[in-house]
Image: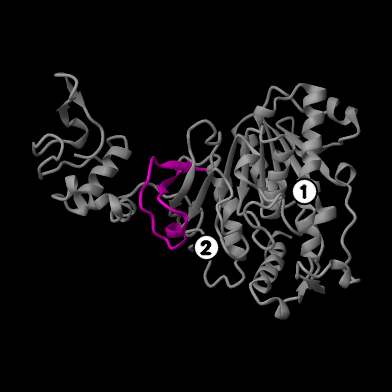
Amino acid sequence: MFVRHLILLGIVAAAYSLPLDQANWQLVPNADGYLHLVNINPYNLPEANPSDPEVLFNPETDIEFRLFTRSNPTQAQILQINNPASITGSNFNPAHPTRFTIHGWNGNGNDGMNSRTRDELLALGDFNMITVDWSVAAVTPNYISARNAVGPAGFGVGRLIDRLIELTGANVNNIYVIGFSLGAHVAGNAGKHFNGRINTIIALDPAGPLFSAGQSDAVSPQDGLYVETIMTNAGLLGANEPLGQSNFYPNGGRNQPGCGVDIGGGCAHGRAPAFYIESLRSSVPFRSTRCASHDEVLGGVCTPSGPDANMGGQPSNFGRGVQGIYFLTTNDASPFARELTLETVKQRLLGEESKRADRADFSIEEKSAAFVGEAGGGKKQQRFNGKCHRCGKTGHMQRNCRVKKPESNANTVVGGMC
């Protein structure tokens, strides 16, 4: 189902990039392989295709909320907005953090993104894992119909959170909502329901076709106390613009290593949930460089501009001052996270940082070796033979550089390159 969803969305995205007079209708397969004529022109009402009418969708009754905890890690308990006993009689524990996961177009609650996120987090600790199945609206060859349902679906998620707070005393500050593709916009709309008070929204390659930054039902930086996007197929299946407070562009955010030709973008699109799921328990973080601009990172270039940050992870970056545009590289297969190696740092330092005048006396190899030593907790420290730009001495470990503070005569150990 997940792969078919990516194929369908890829066809629509490709058609969406064509002039409207060439792209009003496309034949696409459904989950069973049958072809449907799909109207992907936003200016032509779905009713123009009577075989694929817009789905009637009541979010309060048509969304299935599946609760998993360590007490029931694989057998779901169904929570219902209008059935208080389904909540109070469940294993939901308001003392535990709550995580919602939301699928995309033509997906459902059984999608791998949902089950794998659930399994990783329950292996990590006690969580209330709630899978949002909005397939009544999402499973349709009519992309516009599914796209137009993200607002109501997000409202439905918000209504369940209302009930959890009302009936159990759950704390909205202990809730994350994680969505993929169209589900990322559903997550954003759940945040809008709470005027941005949900702790964290994670938007995994939010769907791009028929969305743009600033639209009322698109995920936005204001939807949560912390909103993070992971962009892996920007401009095709995924949105092109930064839609979060922090926006991570692995490998430049458009194409992903290991995906081959990937004409429809499905492989790259699917890397966003794969990266996020790995980040939850990986001993190697997805370390990312903050970049000067969105435009340059899409070209695979990053001028360092501020502190580094980790992409994804548990807990999130909430409260850590992480915001802006971030670039990172990954491996072409799992495990995707890359250790801070001499080569990756060398590539990073070949950017603007390597041009700093106070380090011009050192080769890129020397600077890379020092950086790896600093980041590696001393395990790979290298000794310079050159002249230290901080103290003027030679032949000492970069962590042991001692300089005098201007306001004091006391020698102070200075981290950072020397």
Residue 144 appears at what percent x and percent y? 78, 63
Can residue 164 be seen at all in this image of the molecule? Answer: yes
Select label 1 or label 2 by which is in front.
Answer: 1
Does 290 lie within the magenta span?
yes
Residue lying at 71% horizontally and 80% vertically, measured from the top left: 22
Q: Which residue is mark 2?
A: 254
Amino acid type indicated by mark 1? Gly
Q: Assign the C terminus to one quadrant of the image.
A: top left
Residue 336 appears at what percent x and percent y? 48, 52
Tell me the distance, in whole angstroms, between the alpha carbons under discs 1 and 2: 26 Å
Mark number for residue 342?
A: none
Q: Assign the N terminus to one quadrant of the image.
A: bottom right
**In the rendered structure, which disc, 1 or 2, sits on the residue that comes first in sequence?**
1
Quarter of the view holding residue 77: top right
Point out the stretch of residues depicted in magenta.
285-311
Q: Is residue 336 above or below residue 36?
A: above
Instruction: Give the secondary structure at mark 2.
Output: loop
Question: In the displayed structure, does residue 224 sit left or right of residue 31?
Answer: left
Crowd around label 2: few <14 · some 14–19 · many ≥20 (10 Å): many
Does 405 lie within the magenta span?
no
Q: Which residue is mark 1?
A: 151
Quarter of the view holding residue 397: top left
Amino acid type indicated by mark 2? Arg
Q: Is residue 5 above or below residue 341?
A: below
User: Label 2 near label 1: C-beta < 8 Å?
Assistant: no
